[in-house]
Image: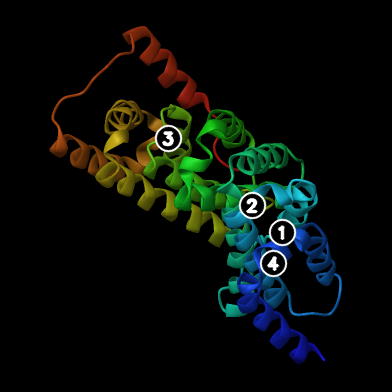
């Protein structure tokens, strides 16, 4: 009976941490694969994930090394469980999605496991599958919002990978997910590169000719509005970006390609210069001109 299974799993989730320590450590290596096998049966996934989360939390608190032999299979299985497009009108789907992210969060608290997870995410970010890339971004964004200190050693390589995605992505859904990751990076003061500013500014523009292969007109409009709001939010609340934004937004303000959003650019600049009227230009004038030319020549989104 499915309902009976759910009740049993929920009870086990509460009882497991109360077991004797030696029993917990002896059974962990066998128990986790058995829990993963439950996903292949007609058992409520949320209840299974809740129990798995309880097992991971208990073992990681007592003796994390007991998971060493199964960590690869565990990370791979959890990655498959991440929901690419959670349906927020179905609370159970969303709950299951965040329970999976909670499992990743627990594993990321262990240095060896966090490195392994981040290496896995980088591999999937380079994958040809859009779903795999979106899953990686969702996990990365969750880490940045909840435990950024655990993944700092792998962030430089991850940021380089994100810069490549910024230039190559065409799907609107992928760009919306990438935007959330950029916001999380900015809030944790990890953005130093102008490519991230270019992404937000460029996709704030609204174009009369849209590529319907990459997203509907509504999705394109949603992306533009989200980027416009994000740009002002970054300009008004993220102090570590102020100097980078001043330099970049002043360059974009005088370019013809960005006439459509000059009002928002001016509003962002007003907010930035209200905080500090000074600007630090570390770039030579000829380099600024070259950068502006490259920006103007950049292909529009969806091209």
Q: What whole-number distance in Å separates the C-alpha atoms at marks 2 and 3?
A: 32 Å
The residue pinned by badge 1 equals 25
Marked residue nearer the N-terminal end (3 or 1):
1
Marked residue nearer the N-terminal end (2 or 3):
2
Residue 208 visible in rendering: no
Residue 210 image position (x, y, % from top left): 59, 49
Tell me the element at label 2.
Answer: helix
Residue 226 image position (x, y, % from top left): 43, 54
Q: Nearer the viewer, residue 117 or 212?
A: 117
Q: Nearer the viewer, residue 102 or 218?
A: 102
Dots 2, 1 in contact, CB < 8 A: yes
Q: Residue at x 83, y 61 (%)?
A: 30
Marked residue nearer the N-terminal end (4 or 1):
1
Marked residue nearer the N-terminal end (2 or 1):
1
The residue pinned by badge 2 equals 63
Q: What whole-number distance in Å separates the C-alpha atoms at marks 2 and 1?
A: 7 Å
* Closer to viewer: mark 4 or mark 1: 1
Tell me the element at label 1.
Answer: helix
Marked residue nearer the N-terminal end (2 or 4):
4
Residue 67 image position (x, y, % from top left): 73, 51
The residue pinned by badge 3 equals 190
Dots 3, 1 in contact, CB < 8 A: no
76 displayed left or right of 227: right
Q: Residues within 10 Å of mark 3 (few under 14, many from 20)?
A: some
Q: What whole-number distance in Å separates the C-alpha atoms at marks 3 and 4?
A: 32 Å
The residue pinned by badge 4 equals 52
């Amino acid at each position: 009976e499915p309902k009976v299974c759910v009740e049993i799993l929920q009870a086990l989730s509460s009882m497991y941490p109360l077991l004797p320590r030696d029993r917990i450590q002896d059974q962990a290596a066998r128990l986790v694969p058995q829990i993963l096998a439950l996903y292949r049966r007609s058992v409520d996934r949320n209840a299974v994930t809740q129990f798995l989360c309880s097992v991971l939390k208990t073992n990681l608190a007592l003796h994390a090394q007991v998971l060493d032999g199964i960590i690869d299979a565990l990370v791979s299985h959890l990655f498959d469980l991440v929901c690419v497009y959670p349906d927020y009108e179905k609370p159970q789907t969303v709950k299951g999605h965040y329970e999976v992210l909670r499992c990743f969060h627990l594993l990321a608290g262990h240095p060896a496991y966090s490195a392994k997870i981040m290496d896995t995410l980088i591999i999937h970010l380079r994958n040809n599958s859009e779903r795999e890339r979106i899953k990686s971004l969702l996990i990365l964004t969750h880490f940045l919002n909840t435990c950024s200190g655990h993944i700092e050693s792998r962030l430089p390589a991850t940021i380089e990978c994100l810069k490549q995605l910024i230039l190559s992505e065409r799907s609107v859904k992928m760009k919306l997910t990438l935007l959330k990751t950029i916001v999380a990076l900015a809030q944790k003061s990890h953005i130093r590169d102008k490519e991230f500013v270019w992404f937000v500014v460029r996709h704030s523009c609204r174009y009369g000719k849209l590529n319907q292969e990459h997203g509907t007109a509504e999705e394109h409009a949603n992306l533009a509005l989200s980027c416009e709001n994000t740009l002002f939010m970054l300009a008004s609340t993220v102090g570590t970006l102020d100097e980078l934004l001043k330099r970049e937004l002043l360059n974009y303000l005088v370019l013809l390609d960005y006439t459509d959003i000059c009002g928002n650019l001016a509003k962002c600049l007003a907010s930035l210069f209200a905080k500090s009227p000074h600007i630090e230009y570390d770039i030579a004038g000829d380099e600024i001109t070259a950068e502006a030319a490259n920006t103007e020549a950049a292909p529009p989104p969806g091209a």
